[in-house]
């Protein structure tokens, strides 16, 4: 599993999270959770969600996200659970 603990060093800095689709989230890293060790979630202030064409599609005062690699999506409700891949 990748170690994202170096994100602790970026608290209070403007950061750019880039995704494989070309979309980005840009803003000020205000917190990492947990506060020490491997990072599972981050809080980004003054966040801009930017699509793959470079357009800002949303502004958010605060956004909590998981900076880790996504390994799957599973339907949690409905007639039967199934993986989406």
Image (tube, rainbow, N blue to C red):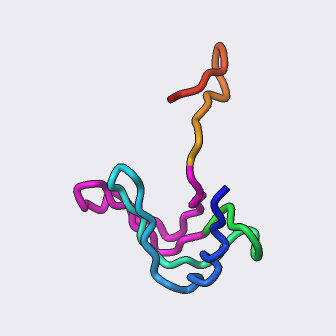
Camera-side residue: 85 or 23? 85
Give the x, y percent position of residue 73.
Answer: 58, 35
The secondary structure that most of the magenta stretch takes on is strand
Asked if residue 63 is positioned above or below residue 81 in the image, the reply reads below
- Asked which quadrant contains residue 62, the reply is bottom right
Asked if residue 30 is positioned above or below residue 70 in the image, the reply reads below
Q: Quadrant of the N terminus?
A: bottom right
Asked if residue 30 is positioned above or below residue 51 in the image, the reply reads below
Give the x, y percent position of residue 47.
Answer: 45, 69
Give the x, y percent position of residue 54.
Answer: 25, 61
Farthest residue, direction top: 79
Give the x, y percent position of residue 25.
Answer: 42, 64
Camera-side residue: 37 or 29? 37
Q: Residue at x 67, y 29 (%)?
A: 76
- Asked which quadrant contains residue 11, the reply is bottom right
Q: Which residues are magenta?
A: 43-69
Q: Residue at x 49, y 70 (%)?
A: 61
- Is residue 56 shown in magenta? yes
Farthest residue, direction front: 1
- Please state the total of marks drawn on the protein image: 0
- Asked which quadrant contains residue 42, the reply is bottom right
Q: Residue at x 63, y 68 (%)?
A: 4
């Amino acid at each position: 599993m990748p170690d994202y603990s170096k994100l602790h060093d970026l608290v209070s800095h403007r950061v750019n999270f880039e995704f494989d689709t070309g979309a980005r989230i840009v803003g000020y890293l205000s917190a990492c959770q947990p506060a020490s060790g491997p990072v599972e979630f981050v809080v980004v202030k003054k966040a801009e969600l930017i699509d793959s064409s470079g357009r800002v599609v949303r502004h958010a005062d605060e956004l909590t996200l998981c900076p880790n690699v996504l390994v799957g999506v599973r339907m949690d409700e409905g007639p039967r659970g199934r993986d989406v891949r």
